[in-house]
Image: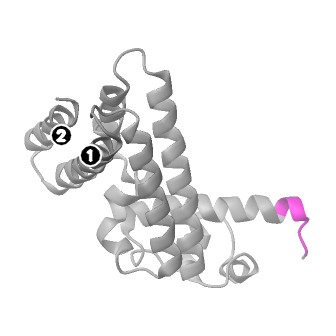
Amino acid sequence: MRVSREQAAQNRERILDAAARLFRERGFEGIGVADLMKEAGLTHGGFYGHFCSKDDLIAQASARELTRSLTRLSHVGERASGDPLAEVADTYLSRSHRDNPGAGCVLAALGPDVSRQGPAVRHAVSGYVRSICDLLAGLVPGKSKAARRQKAIGTYATLVGAMVLARAVDDRDLSAEILEAGRAAVTR
């Protein structure tokens, strides 16, 4: 049975949405194509009408979510009523973000996995890291462009690292302490 172009586009979006969430929740190797398609409400056979391979899906889902993440954090900074950097840190290092990796930052959920992916994923991540550091460079203090860039890179590394650690520990009090320490390190 043939589907319209509009329906095919909607199906593709459902696959990308499911993949992006499930990859962040389970890792790139933690979900197979058949289960992913089932989660999207589609049959396994339809996968290859949308993507060349699972690697192609990983690259496209990652690139899309990285773009969305940059847009979200950019809006947080733009809409901040007070210190934009503090607003970004509060949003990123929130308990909600910690508790919902499937809806959160690709790098906080999949950082080590990304380093083992192919060029398309690593290229998307490199572009994202450049862009998020550019965004943060406009929010951090510094006397020169180079100083702000260095502070921005350190800030982003602190945000991601604090989120990874907060998710890794099994002690909720320690996890909350890590999030708070990350916020303090970024905003002092």
**Is residue 4 shown in magenta?**
yes
**Residue at the image position 9 percent from the left and 38 percent from the top:** 173
Q: Which residues are magenta?
A: 2-7
Q: From this viewpoint, which residue is outermost toward the front?
A: 144
As helix, strand or loop, the secondary structure at mark 1 comes to helix
How many numbered discs?
2
- Marked residue nearer the N-terminal end (1 or 2): 1
Image quadrant holding the C terminus, namely: top left
Observer-nearest residue: 177 or 138?
138
Q: Which residue is mark 1?
A: 159
**Residue at the image position 53 percent from the left and 55 percent from the top:** 65
**Residue at the image position 29 percent from the left and 51 percent from the top:** 153
Q: Which residue is mark 2?
A: 182
Q: Amino acid at mark 1?
A: Leu
Observer-nearest residue: 114 or 124?
124
Q: Amino acid at mark 2?
A: Gly
Give neighbour class at mark 1: few <14, some 14-19, many 20+ (Cα, 10 Å).
many
Position of 9 with respect to 114 (left or right) is right
Position of 45 with respect to 186 (left or right) is right
Residue 110 in the image, given as x and y percentages of width and height: 35, 65
Asked if residue 35 is positioned above or below residue 41 in the image, the reply reads: below
The quadrant where residue 116 appears: bottom left
Observer-nearest residue: 87 or 21?
87
Q: Are circles 1 and 2 on residues that touch, CB within 8 Å?
A: yes
The quadrant where residue 23 appears: bottom left
Q: Is residue 19 visible?
A: no
Position of 67 with respect to 114 (left or right) is right
Observer-nearest residue: 63 or 109?
63
**Is residue 68 shown in magenta?**
no
